[in-house]
Structure formats: structure tokens, C-alpha cells
Image (spheres, grey):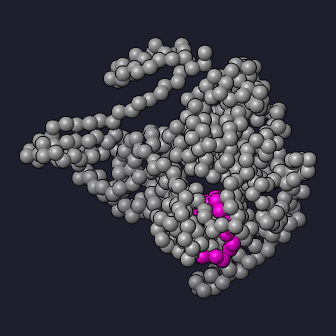
């Protein structure tokens, strides 16, 4: 380990604990902290300048990447079909991360993702790749978005696809097309994205690529000859993925000479910078120091920092048409960063971009602090976490037994479980959760209707006679292997399900 790195590491420890100085005077500690900040910045810049790999870019000039040199794509797949491992290999191929350094599934950064082995948050990384395109070697800027595979996090997938022009549809060479493969395909298809089929894990003994190609043809009408055969684990066939992305996926369609329009894709809270927003520049360009406004709230902000994720935050001073990056605008409240919002230059008039479909909550659960005096701390934690997960609905409620708390709506049981786990791990909150319920609609004799999420809120007035009650129903398409058809039909009939149609889709 170099002396510069050791010095940087030691200064980080000092910076993190300024109260460890012997002088108790606040001004002295503050000036010492500021001094350490400046020294730390110098040592880190010196370290990265002298220890960067030959692929690293100490300064990135985005002006050389016009729209025709940009490709925005995401990786979509069923759970555990290898999309995060494929993302790792692509980051290594482009020199964005060093092979063998860092953790596996590099873009899965949450503790809950590592413990469960699933992707919960969609993550973006910018890569640079040279490719001979139209007989000339050109360097392309490629924005990769790794998405979740579980149905409970389909809202993350829909947000990611809004910033893309294409998608890699990853299918396990042994398991074949599964439920979320179908769901994610239709999300991408409805967004008019170019879809590149990738058959992964061909190194497995039970792999049958020919059968999977036939499935892709019969179910999605995808040309079997266009499917890429890869193994993200061994690296086999990966050299054909990036050229396929460049040649098949179109560049962003935005207009560089138009007024600025940015789509707010995601946001999270940083203790020092405030709210950091992930944005996709649809039209125009953004420079550091400019004033921007929100179409949803009407508030104006100054752009304090702007850059790309490569894969960590790298300041560039600008973002141009078609590029995906981050901005720091001094937002201090998470309620100001509304996912799906349109950001534009202040004093200009633009047509807001179409946002995302609103999340449809399936289950509701009450969250209460284990200690009643921790209500404000829990409120603060939920507010921070909902900035990272815009698909959760939160309303305050009170219970005679548990006191003040919150009624939260989730997309499913796994989504609810992950939210609870993140509250405990990331914010140290100790919560009591009630049994999850679904919403009902009650109609009364006077013709009024009321939506009930919590049985405790059901009116007990005898004068209000209930004439009808509706419970949630769903029209579902269930895709299963043929050997399980009988058991699933029996299960559905026991739950008052009615079979409408039965067909074999891979024949």
C-alpha cells in the first residue's frame, strides 16, 4: 500500500471523527476539519493521478460524445439469470472497474441485496468503449442500467427503461423463459425499445441453447439467429455483446439545439450534498452553475455539481443531449425530488416529458416505532428511504394500542420485507409492523363509498348500513411448466379463481 493511500485513509478516519481532537473549542475543530478536507482532497487526487489504470480518465470531456456516439441500454431478466454478473463483466471489459478488484455484483451496493442475492435498486454506470463502426474506430459513451428481476420491483425496471433506447434480455440457458422474462419483455416492448436476446450460462451441463432459441421465437417472435450465446461466469461469448449494443441499438433521439429537458429517474440523500438526482438529458444541455426549475413543484435551484456515474460519481461540469448522469442542486427535502419529474432551465417554457405510470400498491401494512418516543426519528428515516424508493406510499395514522405510526403501501410482500430490513440496517430504526392487508371498498345505503385500508377505520355507526363490499380482484396470466398445470389450477379454484383460457405458448 502506498504512503499516499495510507495518508488518505488516515485522514478519512480523522475527518469522520472531528470530536477526537483534544481542543474542545468548536471553531478550532471546524477549522481543523476544513484543513483536513483540503489535504484529503489533495492526497486523493495525487493517488488517483499516479495509480490510475491506462483505461482511467482523470478528466472526461463529454463534448466529444455527440448523440450518435451514445448508447443507453438496460439489462432485464428473471431473478437469478445472471444479469448482475453480466454487468460486472461488461464493466471489466470497458476498463470501468479492474478485474478481480472490488466485490462481485459490483452494482448491487445495498446490504440487503448482498444478503439476499437479489437486485433491489436499479443502478447506472457509464462506460467508454472503442469500436470499429462504419469502417472507422470510434469511442462510444455507453450508459448501462442493471435492473431488478423480481416482480415486486418492476417499478424500478419501468423507470430504467424510460432512459434507454434498448435492452439486453438475458435468459438462463438451462431454465429458459420464466415469468419475469415475459413481464420485463413486455415492459421493454411497450416502451418501443430494441431488444437483444442474450442466452446466458451456456457453460452449464444442462444448458440447451437451441430449446431457448425456439422459446424466444415462439413467445416473443425474436429472430433466433440474433441471440447471443454467453457465459458471464467464464467470459465466453462476451466479446460480441458490446458490438451488438452499438450496432443494433439506436442513439438517443433528443435535439441538442432545443431547450433543456431532463427526466428525473431516481434520487437518494447524501448527508453532505443533500439530494443527489439521477437524470437523463432528453433535449438540450446542462452546465454547472445554471438555474433549473421543476415542472412538478415550480421550485428553482442552482446546479452545484453535475457529472456521470463511472461507476462512482465523477464530476464533468456538464451533461449533453442523450447522456445520463447526476446533479446536485441543493435540494434539502426528499419531497422536492419527484421521480418522473421534468427539469428545465429557469425562465424557459417547455412541454413536460411524460412521466412514469403511477405505482399500484398491492398490500398495506402499518409501521410503528418500538418506542413511542421515536416517532420523529422513524418519520425522518421513512422520509429518507422513500427518496430511494418512490414506489412506497406513506400516510400517517394512529392506533389505540401502538400510538402514532404510518400506513405504507407496497408492491408486494417481498417489497415490504425489504423496506423493513432497509429501515433497520440503513437507518437504525426499530419498528413494529402490522399484518399486511389489501384495500376494500364499502358502499353504504346513502350511495357513498369509502376505501378501507385498515379494518380499524371501518365506521361502526349503526345508522350507516353497508349495502355492498368489494375486494381486490386481478386478471392474471400464469406461466408455468406443463407438469405443474394441474396443481396450479386446483390452487386457483380453491381461492375462488375462475379459469378463462388455457394454452401452450411454446408449441
**Residue 94: horizontal and vertical position, in percent?**
82, 49
Q: Which residues make up the magenta segment?
A: 276-291
- Count how many numbered circles sit on residues in the image: 0
| Residue at the (82%, 42%) spot, across then down | 243
Classify residue 312 by image quadrant: bottom right
Query: In the picture, which quadrant includes the N terminus?
Result: bottom right
Q: In this view, does 473 lie above or below 49?
A: above
Query: In the picture, which quadrant includes the C terminus?
Result: top right
| Residue at the (65%, 27%) spot, across then down | 221
Instruction: In this rendered view, identify the residue nearer to me: 242 or 99.
Output: 242
Classify residue 231 by image quadrant: top right
- Is any atom of residue 491 visible in this view? no
**Residue 503: horizontal and vertical position, in percent?**
51, 17
Main secondary-structure element of the magenta-colored stretch = strand
Confirm whether the magenta stretch covers residue 348.
Answer: no
Classify residue 139 by image quadrant: bottom right
| Residue at the (59%, 44%) spot, across then down | 191
Q: In this view, does 101 lie to the left or right of 420?
A: right
Confirm whether the magenta stretch covers residue 284.
Answer: yes
**Residue 152: horizontal and vertical position, in percent?**
50, 40
Q: Is residue 384 left or right of residue 372?
A: right
Q: In this view, does 212 lie above or below 349?
A: above
Amino acid at each position: 500500500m502506498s504512503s499516499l493511500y495510507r495518508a488518505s485513509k488516515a485522514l478519512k478516519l480523522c475527518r469522520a471523527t472531528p470530536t477526537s481532537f483534544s481542543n474542545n473549542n468548536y471553531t478550532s475543530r471546524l477549522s481543523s476539519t476544513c484543513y483536513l478536507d483540503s489535504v484529503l482532497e489533495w492526497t486523493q487526487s495525487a493517488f488517483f493521478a499516479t495509480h490510475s489504470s491506462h483505461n482511467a480518465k482523470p478528466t472526461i470531456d463529454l463534448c466529444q460524445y455527440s448523440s450518435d456516439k451514445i448508447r443507453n441500454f438496460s439489462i432485464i431478466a428473471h431473478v437469478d439469470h445472471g444479469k448482475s454478473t453480466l454487468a460486472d463483466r461488461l464493466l471489466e471489459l470497458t476498463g470501468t472497474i479492474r478485474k478481480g478488484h472490488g466485490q462481485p455484483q459490483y452494482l448491487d451496493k445495498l446490504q440487503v441485496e448482498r444478503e439476499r442475492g437479489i437486485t433491489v435498486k436499479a443502478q447506472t454506470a457509464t462506460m467508454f468503449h472503442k469500436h470499429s463502426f462504419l469502417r472507422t474506430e470510434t469511442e462510444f459513451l455507453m450508459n448501462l442500467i442493471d435492473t431488478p428481476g423480481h416482480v415486486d420491483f418492476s417499478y424500478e425496471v419501468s423507470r430504467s427503461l424510460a432512459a434507454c433506447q434498448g435492452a439486453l434480455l438475458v435468459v438462463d440457458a438451462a431454465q429458459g423463459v420464466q415469468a419475469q422474462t415475459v413481464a420485463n419483455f413486455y415492459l421493454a416492448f411497450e416502451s418501443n425499445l430494441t431488444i437483444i436476446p442474450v442466452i446466458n450460462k451456456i457453460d452449464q451441463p444442462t444448458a440447451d441453447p437451441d430449446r431457448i432459441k425456439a422459446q424466444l421465437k415462439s413467445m416473443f417472435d425474436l429472430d433466433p439467429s440474433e441471440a447471443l450465446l454467453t457465459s458471464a461466469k467464464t467470459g465466453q461469448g462476451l466479446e460480441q455483446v458490446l458490438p451488438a449494443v452499438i450496432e443494433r441499438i439506436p442513439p438517443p433521439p433528443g435535439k441538442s439545439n432545443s431547450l433543456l429537458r431532463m427526466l428525473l429517474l431516481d434520487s437518494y440523500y447524501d448527508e453532505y450534498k443533500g439530494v443527489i438526482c439521477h437524470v437523463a438529458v432528453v433535449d438540450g444541455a446542462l452546465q454547472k452553475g445554471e438555474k433549473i426549475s421543476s415542472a412538478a413543484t415550480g421550485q428553482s435551484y442552482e446546479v452545484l455539481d453535475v457529472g456521470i456515474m463511472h461507476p462512482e460519481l465523477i464530476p464533468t461540469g456538464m451533461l449533453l443531449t442523450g447522456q445520463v448522469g447526476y446533479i446536485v442542486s441543493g435540494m434539502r427535502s426528499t419531497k422536492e425530488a419527484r421521480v418522473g419529474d421534468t427539469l428545465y432551465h429557469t425562465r424557459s417554457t417547455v412541454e413536460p416529458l411524460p412521466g412514469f405510470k403511477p405505482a399500484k400498491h398491492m398490500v398495506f401494512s402499518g409501521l410503528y416505532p418500538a418506542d413511542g418516543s421515536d416517532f420523529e426519528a422513524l418519520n425522518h428515516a421513512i422520509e429518507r428511504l422513500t427518496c430511494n424508493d418512490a414506489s412506497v406510499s406513506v400516510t400517517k395514522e394512529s392506533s389505540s394500542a401502538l400510538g402514532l405510526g404510518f400506513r405504507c403501501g407496497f408492491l408486494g410482500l417481498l417489497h415490504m420485507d425489504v423496506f423493513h430490513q432497509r429501515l433497520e440496517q440503513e437507518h437504525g430504526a426499530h419498528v413494529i409492523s402490522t399484518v399486511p392487508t389489501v384495500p376494500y371498498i364499502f358502499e353504504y345505503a346513502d350511495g357513498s363509498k369509502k376505501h378501507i385500508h385498515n379494518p380499524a377505520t371501518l365506521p361502526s355507526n349503526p345508522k350507516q348500513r353497508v349495502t355492498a363490499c368489494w375486494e381486490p380482484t386481478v386478471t392474471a396470466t400464469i406461466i408455468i411448466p406443463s407438469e405443474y398445470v394441474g396443481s396450479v389450477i386446483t390452487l386457483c379454484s380453491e381461492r375462488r379463481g375462475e379459469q378463462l383460457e388455457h394454452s401452450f405458448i411454446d408449441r
